[in-house]
Image (tube, rainbow, N blue to C red):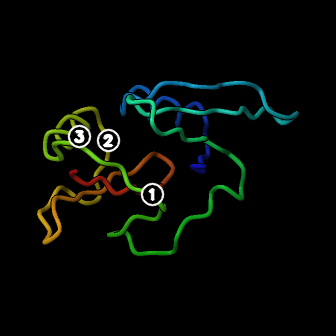
């Protein structure tokens, strides 16, 4: 679950900017919300983009650290960073070489910060 304020904006971010596919987008409940799932390009991971207040909880950490509990991986981190930055994806942490490998961090429009590391 990824907590979002605006499902349509989140759908645009994950599909148009990051290349995910919509797996499910159906009305859910009486409040106008939708059950919205997006899937990674390889089909291995599915995210539910949820407007539920319970799903908007984030880890309380400084802005220099991720506030979500999962990582994304790239085969070529610098190339992926350049491609996504050109599309307007915000990177609070630009790619940098660490003792354990390359890492960076991107953010969605809802303030979720995700680590992006090189395989």
**Within 10 Å of the Cα at label 3, are there few (<14), some (14-19), or many (20+) other Cα atoms?**
some
* Residue at 43% in and 47% down: 108
Of 46 and 66, which appears nearest the observer?
46
Q: What distance separates the C-alpha of mark 1 from that of mark 3?
A: 21 Å
**Within 10 Å of the Cα at label 1, are there few (<14), some (14-19), or many (20+) other Cα atoms?**
few
Of tags 1 and 3, the one toward the viewer is: 1
Q: Position of residue 81 (x, y in %)?
A: 20, 44
Q: Position of residue 75 (x, y in %)?
A: 20, 42
Q: Position of residue 111 (x, y in %)?
A: 47, 55
| Residue furthest out toward the front | 44
| Residue furthest out toward the right | 30
Q: Are marks 2 and 3 in contact (CB under 8 Å)?
A: yes
- Tell whether 5 sits left or right of 38: right
* Residue at 14% in and 61% down: 96
Secondary structure beneath label 1: loop
Q: What distance separates the C-alpha of mark 1 from that of mark 2?
A: 18 Å
Which dot marks residue 98? none
Of tags 1 and 2, the one toward the viewer is: 1
**The image quarter in which residue 87 lies:** top left
Which comes before the other along the chain, label 1 or label 3? 1
Q: Mark 1 highlights which residue?
A: 70
Which comes before the other along the chain, label 1 or label 2? 1
Which dot marks residue 89? 2
| Residue furthest out toward the bottom | 61
**Within 10 Å of the Cα at label 2, are there few (<14), some (14-19), or many (20+) other Cα atoms?**
some
């Amino acid at each position: 679950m990824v907590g979002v304020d605006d499902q349509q904006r989140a759908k645009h971010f994950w599909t148009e900017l990051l290349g995910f596919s919509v797996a499910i987008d159906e009305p859910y409940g009486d409040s106008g919300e939708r059950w919205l799932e997006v899937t990674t390009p390889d089909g291995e991971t599915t995210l539910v983009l949820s407007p539920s207040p319970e799903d908007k909880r984030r880890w309380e950490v400084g802005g220099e650290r991720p506030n979500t509990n999962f990582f994304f991986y790239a085969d070529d981190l610098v190339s992926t960073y350049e491609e996504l930055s050109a599309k307007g994806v915000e990177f609070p942490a630009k790619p940098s070489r660490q003792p354990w490998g390359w890492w960076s961090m991107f953010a969605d429009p809802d303030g979720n910060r995700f680590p992006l590391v090189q395989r």
